[in-house]
Image (spheres, grey):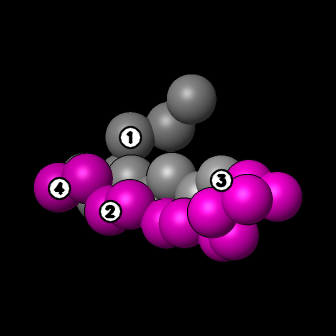
Amino acid sequence: MHNYGIITLCTNDAIKGTFCATLE
């Protein structure tokens, strides 16, 4: 995994829908 300083994690959940979290 590369570290660009900002990592965006996205999950596609059938119940909650698409959720993205940005870690700085």
Residue matched to label 1? 3
Dominant secondary structure (helix, strand or loop) of the stretch shown in magenta: strand
Amino acid marked by disc 4:
Glu
| Left or right: where 22 falls relative to 16 | left
Question: Which sits earlier in the primary sequence, circle 3 or circle 2?
Answer: 3
Residue found 50% across the figure and 37% down from its top: 2
Say if mark 3 contacts mark 1, CB within 8 Å.
no
Closer to the eye: label 2 or 4? 2
Residue found 65% across the figure and 53% down from its top: 11
The magenta stretch spans which residues?
Answer: 13-24
Say if mark 3 contacts mark 4, CB within 8 Å.
no
Amino acid marked by disc 1:
Asn
Closer to the eye: label 3 or 1? 3
Residue matched to label 3? 11
Residue matched to label 4? 24
For the residues marked 3 and 1, what is the alpha-carbon distance in whole angstroms? 19 Å
- Locate the C terminus and report the quarter of the image it occupies: bottom left
**Residue 13 on image: x %, y %:** 74, 54
Amino acid marked by disc 3:
Thr
Residue found 54% across the figure and 66% down from its top: 19
Residue matched to label 2? 22
- Locate the N terminus and report the quarter of the image it occupies: top right
Say if mark 2 contacts mark 4, CB within 8 Å.
yes
* Mark 4 neighbour density, 10 Å: few (under 14) some (14–19) many (20 or more): few
- Residue 22 placement: quadrant: bottom left
Comparing 14 with 22, the one in front is 14
